[in-house]
Amino acid sequence: AGCVGILLRDLIAESFHSMRITGIGFLFTAIFLETAHRAQRSQDKISSSGLLDENWQLPTKKQALIVGLAQAFAILPGVSRSGSTIASGLIA
C-alpha cells in the first residue's frame, strides 16, 4: 500500500477532491463487503457459534498478496481499509 501511495501520489491526491470518486469508493466497499459475506457463508468458515473453525490455517502467499492489494486499493477515498482487508481475507 505504501508503494502504491508513493507511485500514484498525485493521482490519489486529486481523487480526494472528487465527490464522484468518493461515492464510487463507498459503493465499491458496500459491494465488496456483501460479496465477502456471501462467500463466507457459502464456505462455512464461521461455525454456528460465530467463531472460526478449529481447522484454520495461516494464509498462503497468494492470499497475503490479495489482502495487500486490497489494502493498497483502500488508499482511495470512500474505500474502507479495514473492510477491504477483512473482505479480501474472507474471499481469498
Image (cartoon, grey):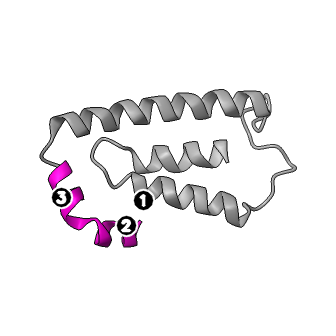
Residue 72, label in figure: 1
Does the segment drawn in magenta span residue 64? Answer: no
Image coords of residue 44 (percent x, y): 79, 33
**Rendered image quadrant of residue 28:** top left
* Mark closer to the chain start, 3 or 1: 3
The residue shown at (58%, 30%) is 35
Q: Looking at the picture, which amino acid does disc 1 mark?
A: Ala
Q: Under tag 3, what secondary structure? A: helix
Q: Looking at the picture, which amino acid does disc 3 mark?
A: Ala
Q: Nearer the viewer, residue 54 or 17?
A: 17
Above-or-below relation of 17 to 34: below
Q: Looking at the picture, which amino acid does disc 2 mark?
A: Val
Residue designated by label 3: 13
Does the segment drawn in magenta span residue 4? Answer: yes
Image coords of residue 37 (percent x, y): 61, 30
What's the magenta bit mostly, secondary-structure-wise?
helix
Residue designated by label 2: 4
Gap in Å between the C-alphas at discs 3 and 2? 12 Å
The residue shown at (79%, 28%) is 48
Image coords of residue 50 (percent x, y): 72, 33
Q: Under tag 1, what secondary structure? A: helix
